[in-house]
């Protein structure tokens, strides 16, 4: 029967979860590796003496890749085999204007979840148990984007898989969301600002989070909790602004 999980279905789900874990892990290694190489070229010596720290960042991140990959793999199977989700492949299934709107909706929802869970992670007990793993990166490097304790990784891994059950999204737009999540996660931790100063200090830059903003969080801890946007930090009075000029060696 369609509603019963057969042994074959369970094997297929496990295979999907394993495949997605590999994809997330390889995506992390390629993206962080590329930006680490860029750092070596643009800021030579910035990561000097951090080999032991980087090794820990990679190990924690690969563990996080499994935690992110498992629910993603289950959702991918459910979408393709059972139609469980609101993911659609036919652009005509929804009005075309919904594509850019859904991108913003997903990013804002993810940012909201991240802000409040991240802020909770800075309470003494959650910080000591879990979030201290991420802040052990001093300074953070391009390899630190997914360096999370499993508890923290779980809080980050559930939000996008949960959203696809409720908010329609084209599969291409979903890929865009994941790409933005990956790139911003890495670039915000590189220890230098990859984006032009003109953008960072522009009206658009005052809304978006880049390394110049997130670096302050790693220095002061109790501020700048957002992921993509500065909306919640500004609304809640936790926005401490950008790092001082020259913080990244410019």
Image (tube, rainbow, N blue to C red):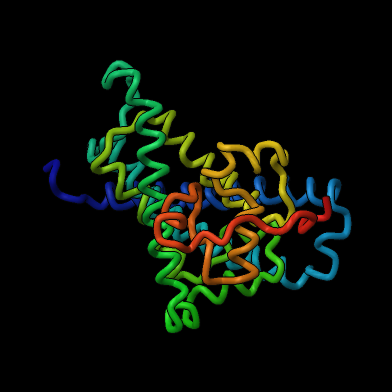
In the picture shown, does residue 222 fall above or below 69?
below
Q: Quadrant of the N terminus?
A: top left
Horizontal relation, residue 109 to residue 48: left or right = left
In the picture shown, does residue 80 fall above or below 144?
above
Foreground residue, 114 or 32?
114
Q: Where does the image place residue 47, in percent across and percent down from the top left?
A: 81, 62
Determine the residue positioned at 86% across, 47% down.
41
Determine the residue positioned at 83% across, 60% down.
46
Q: Where does the image place residue 129, in percent across and percent down from the top left?
A: 47, 81
Foreground residue, 154 or 24?
154
In the picture shown, does residue 91 fall above or below 48?
above
Determine the residue positioned at 29% across, 52% down.
10
Horizontal relation, residue 54 to residue 202: left or right = right
Determine the residue positioned at 72% across, 66% down.
54
Query: Farthest residue in the top direction?
Result: 92
Q: Where does the image place residue 137, in percent across and percent down from the top left?
A: 66, 70
In the picture shown, does residue 8 fall above or below 99?
below
Determine which quarter of the picture holds residue 49.
Answer: bottom right
Q: Where does the image place residue 222, in percent across and percent down from the top left?
A: 52, 71
Q: How many marks?
A: 0
Determine which quarter of the picture holds residue 154.
Answer: bottom left
Foreground residue, 245 or 152?
245
Determine which quarter of the picture holds residue 118.
Answer: bottom left
């Amino acid at each position: 029967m369609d509603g019963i999980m057969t042994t074959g279905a369970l094997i297929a789900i496990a295979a999907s979860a394993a495949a997605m874990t590999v994809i997330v892990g390889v995506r992390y290694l390629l993206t962080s590796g590329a930006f680490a190489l860029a750092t070596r070229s643009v800021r030579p010596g910035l990561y000097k003496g951090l080999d032991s720290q980087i090794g820990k960042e990679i190990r924690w991140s690969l563990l996080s890749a499994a935690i992110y990959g498992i629910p993603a793999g289950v959702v991918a199977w459910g979408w393709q085999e059972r139609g469980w989700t609101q993911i659609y492949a036919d652009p005509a299934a929804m009005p075309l204007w919904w594509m850019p709107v859904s991108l913003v909706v997903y990013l804002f929802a993810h940012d909201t979840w991240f802000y409040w869970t991240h802020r909770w992670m800075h309470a003494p007990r959650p910080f000591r148990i879990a979030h201290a793993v991420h802040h052990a990166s001093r300074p953070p490097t391009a390899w630190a984007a997914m360096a999370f304790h499993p508890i923290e990784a779980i809080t980050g891994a559930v939000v996008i898989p949960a959203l696809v059950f409720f908010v329609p999204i084209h599969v291409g737009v979903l890929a865009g969301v994941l790409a933005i999540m990956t790139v911003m996660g890495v670039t915000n931790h590189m220890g230098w600002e990859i984006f032009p100063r003109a953008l960072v200090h522009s009206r658009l830059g005052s809304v978006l989070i880049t390394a110049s903003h997130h670096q302050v969080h790693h220095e002061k801890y109790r501020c700048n909790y957002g992921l993509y946007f500065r909306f919640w930090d500004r609304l809640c009075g936790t926005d401490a602004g950008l790092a001082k000029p020259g913080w990244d060696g410019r």
